[in-house]
Amino acid sequence: DSGVTQTPKHLITATGQRVTLRCSPRSGDLSVYWYQQSLDQGLQFLIQYYNGEERAKGNILERFSAQQFPDLHSELNLSSLELGDSALYFCASSVAVNEQFFGPGTRLTVL
Amino acid sequence: AQSVTQPDIHITVSEGASLELRCNYSYGATPYLFWYVQSPGQGLQLLLKYFSGDTLVQGIKGFEAEFKRSQSSFNLRKPSVHWSDAAEYFCAVLNDYKLSFGAGTTVTVRA
């Protein structure tokens, strides 16, 4: 158990819908990272927040957005969902930039 | 940008045999390198990391990796594989604040 929690574990929704994925970092970790794991793209970095501020952005679609709240939990919002958004979404947290601890992931299925 | 390549998509090894997973990186300076393991239905667990210093790094679960600058490699090894080592293994490099992952190597352990 890494100490990073993610909810829900599984999410099934339809195209065009919007979902929110939630992540609670390890106690004391100020940084939260979001990654997407899909069969065709592999593991890709989406976005990073540090103490509430966006710090780095990767291959995140404009339909996706994230935020980090004062209690340091983070949410990833995915809207206008397409079939290709079906993937495993991981959250990671760190206190130091060089060691990230991953949550169990949220498996999103878009039908 | 820094990147890593894992040349082997799938490796099958007998229980008790040794295992070596290859990882090649592209970067001019000394990279921050990692090996993660993902068991079926699980998140990513950090096996070991290399930042500097001793080029032979010991990790958890009996794994070790050797950083070889001359070959731009960071190969993962285990002397004797257990059935529980069946999983997907990812090599990663720290790229600014984000991890860039290789495509992964799936390890199958046969009895």
Image: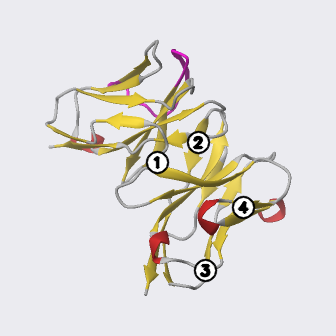
- First of labels 4, 3 by sequence position: 4
Mark nearest the camera among 4 and 1 is 4
Q: Which residues are magenta?
A: A49-64
* Residue A68 position (above or below residue A12): above
Considering the numbered disc 4 on the image, is that residue within a helix, a strand or a loop? Answer: strand
- Find out whether the residues at labels 1 and 2 contact each other: C-beta distance under 8 Å: yes
Q: Quadrant of the C terminus of chain B?
A: bottom left
In the image, residue A84 lies at what x, y percent? 27, 43
Please rate how many residues cluster around mark 2, counting C-alpha atoms within 10 Å: few if below 14, some from 14 to 19, many from 20: many
- Find out whether the residues at labels 4 and 3 contact each other: C-beta distance under 8 Å: no
Question: Residue at coordinates 47% horizontally, 38% vertically from top-left?
Answer: A3
Q: Amino acid at mark 1?
A: Leu
Please rate how many residues cluster around mark 3, counting C-alpha atoms within 10 Å: few if below 14, some from 14 to 19, many from 20: some
In the image, residue B45 lies at what x, y percent? 52, 52
Mark nearest the camera among 1 and 3 is 3
* Residue A53 position (above or below residue A110): above
Disc 3: which residue: B80
Considering the numbered disc 2 on the image, is that residue within a helix, a strand or a loop? Answer: strand
One can see residue A56 in this view: no
In the image, residue B40 lies at what x, y percent? 37, 61
How far apart, in angstroms, are the residues tagged by discs 1 and 3? 28 Å
- First of labels 3, 2 by sequence position: 3
Disc 4: which residue: B58
Q: Is residue B62 left or right of residue B12?
A: right
Q: Amino acid at mark 2?
A: Leu
How far apart, in angstroms, are the residues tagged by discs 4 and 3? 15 Å
- Find out whether the residues at labels 4 and 2 contact each other: C-beta distance under 8 Å: no
Disc 2: which residue: B99
